[in-house]
Structures are given as C-alpha cells and as structure tokens.
Image (spheres, rainbow, N blue to C red):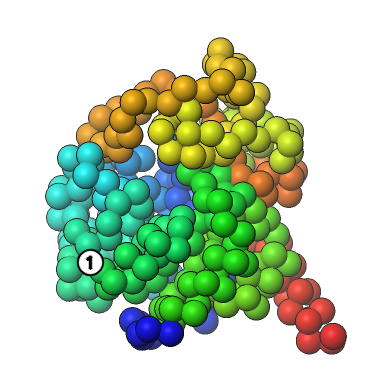
Amino acid sequence: MTQTLTNRPAWIDTLTVPVVAAPMFLVSGPDLVIATSRAGAVGTFPAPNCRTPEELDAWMGTIGDALVDEPWALNLVTHRTNARLEDDLRLVAEHRPPVVITALGSPRPVIETVHAYGGLVIADVVTLGLARKAIAAGVDGLACVSAGAGGHTGFLSPFAFVSAVRREFDGLVTIGGGISDGFGVAGAIAAGADLVYMGTSFLATRESMAVPEYKQMVVDHEVDDLVVSDGITGTAASWLRPSLVANGLDPDALVGPAERVYDATQSPAKRWKDVWAAGQGIGAVTAVEPAADVVARLAEEYRQALERMRTR
C-alpha cells in the first residue's frame, strides 16, 4: 500500500446499509436524494441534471435544508468540455455537499474547493490506471465502476477491481457494477469495499425522475435485454435494447459521435433523453416502489448475509 489518504468518515457507521444510490443522468433529483439519505443510504445526483447554475443552486439548497445530519453527494463532470464547471464549483463552495464525486475527467479541479470546507472528493474510475491517477491527485476515495454497471460502465470484475485497488490505497473505496441486492453488498464489503454503488435498484423508485415508461421497462425486462455500446455517447454504456429499437436504432450497429462532449451548459440530445440505460442488476427490480422500501430490503438482505457468514 503506497499511502494513507484519508480516515474512514464517521457517517459510514450511521448508515442503515453501506450503499450509495449512484448518480443517474436525467433520473436522480432532490426527491430521490432526500428519500434515500433519510432511509439510511447515501443519495446522490449529477450536476448536469440541472440545466442552469440557478437550478443547481436551488436543488442543493433544497437538499441541504432537508438533510442536516445525513450524508449526500453531488456528482460533477470534470471533462474539459464542461464549460459550466467553474460555476458549479462556486455553488459547491457555497452549499458544501459532504461528498463530491468527479466523473469523466481529472478530479484535480475539484479537490482544493471541496477540501477547503472539509468535504470528501471521490473519483469515478473504470480502470486501475485511472484509479492510480486519481490517488496521485489526492482524492479521498474512489468509485470503482465495474462490469455490469448501468449508464457509463466498466469492464473489470468488481471483485478483481477492489482487490487491485486495495493493494495500493486505503482511502474510501466504493465499488459498483451488477450488485443488485444486500447479499451482493455484503460480498463487496467482505472483499474490501467501504460502500457499494447501486443505480438500477433506485431507477424505478417513486422518487426517481425517470418517466413512467422508463420505470416500467426496467421492471419488465432482464439482463439479456441490455446492450453495452459506445454508440450513443462515445463512451461505453449499458442500454436497454427495447429503448434503442423504439428510437429507430439498430442495437447491433450503433455509431457514436465523432467527439465525446460532456458540457452541462448544453441541453441533452434527444437520444440521451429517450434512449434509456440500466445495469445488470435489472432483474432484481420487480416493482415501482418508494426508495425507503428499497433501502429497507437491502438492509435486511445485508443483515441476513452477515449472519450467514457468521454462522459459517
């Protein structure tokens, strides 16, 4: 292990279950963040879900007022094409989210601002090489996005990924990808993770901003109905095959944009809004239900898994 970067945050031990409801584009908003965090997991949302800095200001104010003691996180796109990053960082300094998760770019532009008020910076990474760069930049934690994740996905096994990262890093490690129940959460924690990223499990909740047809598609379909392709955004992501077909796209012959652009100042293209993502945990979603019920079920399964390991 090369270095110690951070102490384990005390709020982890206050959680009902060590789960982060992963930030989902056009899905996660204040209602889902608040409901998830109040239930005992960690609610998050991506800044690009707000079309303007003014809207982001309002969202963070609403969440901050509602969650006084509970942890929550903001996801920031730090890719060079995001022209709104400076404005978003100004609002981060004002509202002080306990955790900021960086994605699709270096975490360096965020670290000074967040550390100045005592917040944690977690870098979203999909390879060991990117994890090492984030560690060198001085992040407090890593979100290791692995094979099976919905939306922008990774390719490593979550267990191989966490094992490799733990040989070099003793900061906060979140692992995600295809983990769909509390039993899987227990396995990831046993393997060395501190927290588990879960997006698809929260996609069809009542508090989700997903349109009803999207939620029902997640309920009605399973893992064989997913397509992993870079043909929508230029970055590999996991998509629901029926939504591709419904938009006149051939799931087996997708052609992506010539250049990847993640600019939060631009309105999302139609295909971002109408082509829907999901992860390999889709089979565990059987109904549209409150986020609190999802957290409670995960917590009970997690408890059962811990008891199973104890007795063995």
Camera-nearest residue between 105 and 308: 105
The residue sitting at the top extreme is 248
Mark 1 surroundings: few (<14), some (14-19) or many (≥20) residues within 10 A? many
Q: Position of residue 262 (x, y in %)?
A: 30, 38
Camera-nearest residue between 265 and 94: 265
Name the residue rendered at 73%, 49% in the picture. Answer: 284
Task: Identify residue type, mark 1.
Answer: Ile
State the quadrant of the C terminus.
bottom right
Q: Is residue 305 visible?
A: yes
| Secondary structure at numbered mark 1 | helix
Q: Position of residue 57 (x, y in %)?
A: 23, 49
Left/right of residue 210 with respect to residue 284 in the rendered view: left
User: Is residue 104 shown above or below 43?
Assistant: above
User: Is residue 167 shown above or below 65?
Assistant: below
Camera-nearest residue between 128 and 228: 128
- Which residue lies under the disc numbered 1? 111
User: Is residue 301 shown above or below 2?
Assistant: above
Q: Quadrant of residue 224?
A: top right
User: Is residue 129 shown above or below 279?
Assistant: below
Name the residue rendered at 21%, 44% in the picture. Answer: 80
Q: How many marks?
A: 1
State the quadrant of the N terminus.
bottom left
Left/right of residue 85 with respect to residue 8 in the rendered view: left
Name the residue rendered at 59%, 17% in the picture. Answer: 250
Left/right of residue 27 with respect to residue 98 in the rendered view: right
Q: Quadrant of residue 306?
A: bottom right
Name the residue rendered at 48%, 61% in the picture. Answer: 144
The residue sitting at the right extreme is 312
Q: Position of residue 42 (x, y in %)?
A: 48, 64
Camera-nearest residue between 87 and 67: 87
Q: Position of residue 230 (x, y in %)?
A: 48, 34
